[in-house]
Amino acid sequence: MNWKLYTLLLVASAFTIIIGAVILRVAGLVPLSLTYLTFIAAAIVFSDSYFVYRENRKALSIGVILGIIAMISASNPAHFNALEKFGSTLSLSLADITLVIGFYLLPMIYIAMYAWSRIREYSKHVKKI
């Protein structure tokens, strides 16, 4: 199991989400309260990444749950509306890029890697029986 890669994916996702929040706040596109909530979410992901780095299996599973939550939370009308406006302004386009990377791409890679590793572990276990 590549613990450092899982950690890197979590850290990259958290940083990407923070960058997007800062872009949206500086452009005045979101209220301060949403920016704070985003920072709290990123702090949770950073915390999980620490425990994944320490090779904690529960933290690895929590990372999957956080990835699913990220994709669900980003799948709302406000985010879809913003994605439809991609290219209209530089700040919105940059925020959209961070949205896709931080809330969809990196979590999907994490979840796919986790699923693949679980399948491999299971198949090794079955072959021993």
Image (cartoon, helix red, strand yellow):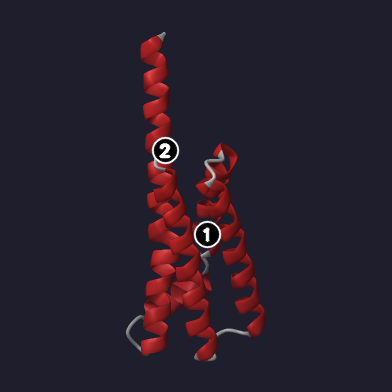
Under circle 1, the secondary element is: helix
Q: Amino acid at mark 2?
A: Ala
Quadrant of the drawing holding the C terminus: top left
Q: Position of residue 16 (x, y in %)?
A: 45, 70
How many residues crowd mark 2 within 10 Å: few (<14), some (14–19), many (20+)?
few
Residue at 42% across, 17% down:
125
Q: Is residue 67 above or below residue 17?
A: above
Residue at the outermost left position: 87
Which mark is first along the chain, 1 or 2? Answer: 1
Q: Position of residue 59 (x, y in %)?
A: 57, 44
Frontmost residue, 6 versus 89:
6
Query: Mark 1 — residue?
Result: 70
Q: Is residue 28 above or below residue 85?
A: below
Quadrant of the drawing holding the N terminus: top left
Q: How many circles with numbers are drawn on the protein?
A: 2
Query: Mark 2 — residue?
Result: 115
Residue at 56% across, 58% down:
45
Residue 85 visible in the current orientation? no
The span from disc 2 to disc 1 (Cα, nearest Å) is: 17 Å
Q: Which mark is residue 102?
A: none
Q: Is residue 45 above or below residue 124?
A: below
**Quadrant hosting residue 80:** bottom left
Q: Position of residue 63 (x, y in %)?
A: 53, 49
Q: Position of residue 120 (x, y in %)?
A: 37, 28
Residue at 48% across, 56% down:
10
Asked if disc 2 and disc 1 are in contact, CB closer than 8 Å, the reply is no
Q: Is residue 4 above or below residue 30?
A: above
Frontmost residue, 44 versus 66:
44
How many residues crowd mark 1 within 10 Å: few (<14), some (14–19), many (20+)?
many
Q: Amino acid at mark 1?
A: Ala
Residue 90 visible in the current orientation? yes
Is 45 placed left or right of 129 in the picture? right
